[in-house]
Amino acid sequence: MIRVVVADDQPLVRMGLRTLIETEDGVQFAGEAVDGREALSLIQSTKPDVVFLDIRMPLMDGLEVLRRVSADPACAEVKIVMLTTFDLDEYVFEALRTGASGFLVKDSDPTDLLRAVHVVADGGSLLSPSVTRRVIDRFASGASARPVPHLDKLTEREREIMRHVASGASNDEIAAVLVISPATVRTHVSRAMVKLGARDRAQLVVFAVQSGLT
């Protein structure tokens, strides 16, 4: 059973997500919060599997909640998906860098919202190719290259695949370009994540941008 918490200051958003979650098999609604402080307290007390967290909330914004949850060892298994009104929110890149497993626009299709629960709970990141490309286009242009620890430990193939990941390509797309199997791509992605200490694929994209690989 995947336990989900929703944190948003808009009653209609909370009600919609709660209704959606309660209709999905294998998913349990674990609570809701109307502001950042309440969200942090709820997350730390219930330790849900997945949190839908609004970037902008009263009392404490979503980014600060994310920072505190990411820094709390007791919440290491909590996966956070940021919610935003606009698909190119100025805080998205910071959210991914801080440890969010992805982000969704609030008016996303219900199918995408439910898919997010399962993908993130399974350790994946919610960054579709189109969304990734827009994030990179928006933020990479203004992001100066900075050293990424242990980048020199990557093999040339891992660097190559990391560049493809940062371009928004899926494992299947990367496999087709490099003429290797998707399983091999997954292996290289996993190894790169371990070497760089990336929490998930989303952070791997961030590291690629920061290091100038894109």
Image (spheres, rainbow, N blue to C red):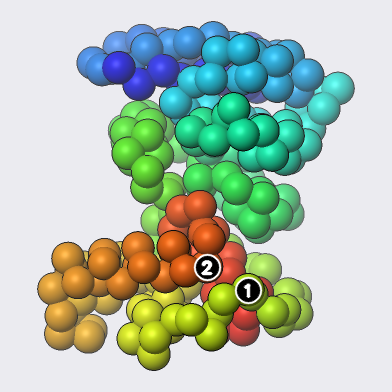
Between 175 and 16, the residue placed more toward the observer is: 175
Q: CA distance from mark 1 to mark 2?
A: 7 Å
Q: Residue at x 53, y 85 (%)?
A: 152
Q: Which residue is mark 2?
A: 196
Q: Residue at x 45, y 37 (%)?
A: 108
Which residue is most to the bottom?
156
Q: Which amino acid is tagged 2?
A: Leu
Q: Residue at x 52, y 68 (%)?
A: 196
- In this image, 23 relative to 129: left or right? left
Location of residue 87 in the rendering, given as x and y in whole percent from the top left corner:
58, 50
**Image position of 164 with respect to 62: above or below:** below
Instruction: Label 1: state its secondary structure.
Output: loop
For the C terminus, give its image quadrant: bottom right
Instruction: Label 2: state its secondary structure.
Output: helix
Q: Which residue is mark 1?
A: 149
**Image position of 3 with respect to 164: above or below:** above
Q: Quadrant of residue 127?
A: bottom left
Q: Residue at x 64, y 56 (%)?
A: 97
Indicate which disc, 1 or 2, sits on the residue closer to the N terminus: 1
